[in-house]
Image: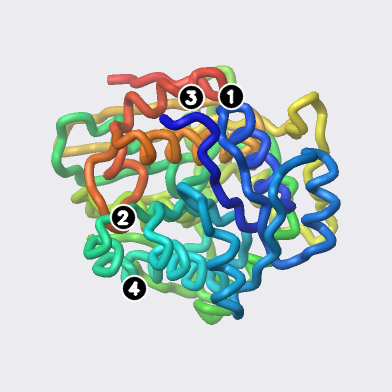
Amino acid sequence: MESGQAVTVFGAYGHTGRFVVAELLERGFTPILSGRDAEKLKELAASWPGLDVRPATVDDPASLDRALTGAAAVVNCAGPFATTAGPVIEAALRAGIPYVDVAAEIEANLDTFAHFAEPAEAAETVIVPAMAFYGGFGDLLVTAAMGEWTAADEAHIAYGLSGWHPTAGTRAAGAVSRERRGGRRVRYTEGRLEYVEDALPTLEWPFPEPMGPRAVLGEFSMADVVTVPSHLAVSEVRTYMTVEAAGELAAADTPSPSPVDERGRSGQTFLVDVVVRSGGAERRAVARGQDIYAVTAPLVVEALERILTGRTRTVGVASAGEIFDARDFLRALSPHISFELRR
């Protein structure tokens, strides 16, 4: 990789954006700070003197073009992605550079696959949506667990979060998603997305020790219901969330995450337990770490480094599990997560 390659971070001053900027610097990239709020960009730049600041808005294509000039890639950290993804992707296509985002919005990710697959393939460039804790991480774990399997009957992704203090961006994105689906919820069953109005089921999930069995909300669908089926032949993709974490997310008075260490991470811990089944066989992947927002940064930057050094399997719009070697990618994250396969 060329040393000091410039990467534009749109939404650089947001909670996740700040983690991405710090990770880029640590990995030898040169972030270009961009976003809609010029004052917040100035405040952020004071923490990292010498970085280029380029305000841009999604309703001004010329400003986005200026923000991407000279960049090797762009990372979109600015939600709601229903509003930002399309314009920033179009700017990336005009610039001829890869695009990566951290969208957890199911509908926004569906839009990216539907609207930009052909243009990205024609341009022979890479667009990776949902390269974050929700979407990309789960997809990598499912892909790693499947190994040489080309199809499976079921993929289950259980999120064991110690708690969930949502950011303002998470709340805003959730509101947009709920509005777009008319208050209904979504699940992936029998090979397709289905919108329903009934309540989420509650059940017990057998997390590995030391967490152990916990009450979870079933069909608590995240971006994994888009990323996994985008390249894997799995009839059922189901995601689960610990009841306590879901309750904190839903409560209006839950505070935003607060830092507890020198990296700015919160004290939140996570355990992601993935089970895939085919016929009578079962395979499992387990990952553990700290802070779902902070861990998105190494996911994003590892993806960028692999894209920019040609360690990819396809072009066009692709999820993490399709475009990268999933097992190798997850092992490369060892400073940030622990990862194991179980048979």
Q: Please, what secondary structure does the residue beneath circle 3 have?
A: loop
Q: Amino acid at mark 3?
A: Leu
Q: Amino acid at mark 1?
A: Met
Q: Quadrant of residue 225?
A: bottom left
Q: Please, what secondary structure does the residue beneath circle 2 have?
A: loop
Check the picture and name the quadrant holding the C terminus. Answer: top left
Q: Give the alpha-carbon distance from disc 1 to disc 4, as whole Å.
A: 41 Å
Please report the residue visible at 31 percent of the width from the left and 55 percent of the height from the top: 125
User: In the displayed structure, does residue 23 sit left or right of residue 69?
Assistant: right
Q: Please, what secondary structure does the residue beneath circle 4 have?
A: helix
Q: Position of residue 273 (x, y in %)?
A: 45, 32
Q: Which mark is residue 220?
A: none
Choose the circle earlier in sequence order: 2 or 4: 4
Whether pointer 3 and pointer 1 mark residues with C-beta atoms closer than 8 Å, the reply is no
Q: Which residue is mark 4?
A: 115
Q: Give the alpha-carbon distance from disc 3 to disc 4, as whole Å.
A: 31 Å
Residue 7 in view: yes
Q: Which mark is residue 211?
A: 1
Q: Which mark is residue 125?
A: 2
**Looking at the image, is mark 3 or mark 1 nearer the viewer?**
3
Q: Residues within 10 Å of mark 2 (few under 14, many from 20)?
A: some
Q: Amino acid at mark 4?
A: His
- Looking at the picture, tell me which residue is in the foreground, 280 or 222: 222
